[in-house]
Amino acid sequence: MRDALLRFFRVPPTPAPPPGSPPQVFRAAPAFFTLRIFRWGLTQLAAIVGLIWAIQFVRFLDTTKVPDFVVTLMRIGEVFAFLAFIVEFFCGWMIVRLDYELRWYMLSDRAIRIREGITTIREKTIALANIQNISVQQGPLQRYFGIADVEVKTAGGGGEATEGKKKHSTSEPMHVAYFRGVANASAIRDLLREGVRKQRNTGLGDPDEPAAHHEGDALTAAQELLAEARALRARVSEG
């Protein structure tokens, strides 16, 4: 069933690494899967309650006041509803499982790449130099399970206007990315901050460039200037 679902949803293989050095790969914590199963289980419980209520409704229905063909259709509907629930139960569990297994959080010395989703695959690549803010978010259930999300924001958020649109939109903004459900959120945040700091330092004056190269250029320019001054003095003396 696992392979069939992957073929059906056309899930691509492991994402290509982001630009830069060989990346560190982080995965969602097992507790993240437990939390997802807990939430999925609540929806299944609601479906079971609804199914039982429908069955009981037909059972206690006064069949003497309802045409026989209507009663027959209702009983056939019960059977199809039960079969549909069985299929949805196993497929739903597998999707939750694959959604957990196929999450990729990659960090190189230049960029991050995040891919998640089964039915809808979302992949983002963000250069460390463009990151403006890094924060750790943790709700009550996440706190109970010992996990958190690391939120990464780049420039272009648009302030309050964008935040207002975000509340009314189901899609995730392109300037925001998440390391969801990780157990080492603080360590990932620190690694991201260090990577951002190195990228910004590299962009200011290119500190990796040898100092001797700059000193040689300055010395050459000074020698050329001195030679021009001597030549000008010689011409003035001859005149």
Image: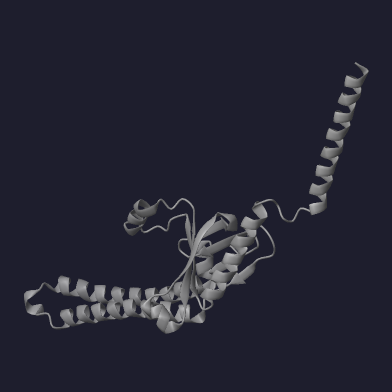
The image quadrant where one finds the C terminus is top right
* Residue 78 x, y percent position in the rendering: 25, 76
Q: Quadrant of residue 55?
A: bottom left
Nearest the eye: 85 or 27: 27
Residue reaching furthest right? Answer: 238
Residue that appears at 51% across and 81% down: 30
Question: Is residue 1 visible to us here?
Answer: no
Question: Is residue 31 visible to us here?
Answer: yes
Q: Is residue 117 above or below residue 62?
A: above
Q: Is residue 229 left or right of residue 63?
A: right
Q: Is residue 236 left or right of residue 185?
A: right
Residue reaching furthest left? Answer: 65
Q: Is residue 215 above or below residue 153?
A: above
* Residue 178 x, y percent position in the rendering: 48, 65
Residue that appears at 42% across and 78% down: 142
* Residue 124 x, y percent position in the rendering: 53, 58
Residue reaching furthest top? Answer: 239
Nearest the eye: 88 or 171: 171
Residue that appears at 47% across and 54% down: 174
Q: Is residue 155 left or right of residue 60?
A: right
Q: Quadrant of residue 228?
A: top right
The colour scheme used to paint the residues is one colour
* Residue 156 x, y percent position in the rendering: 46, 50
Count all numbered tags in the image, as a single digit.
Answer: 0
Nearest the eye: 129 or 101: 129
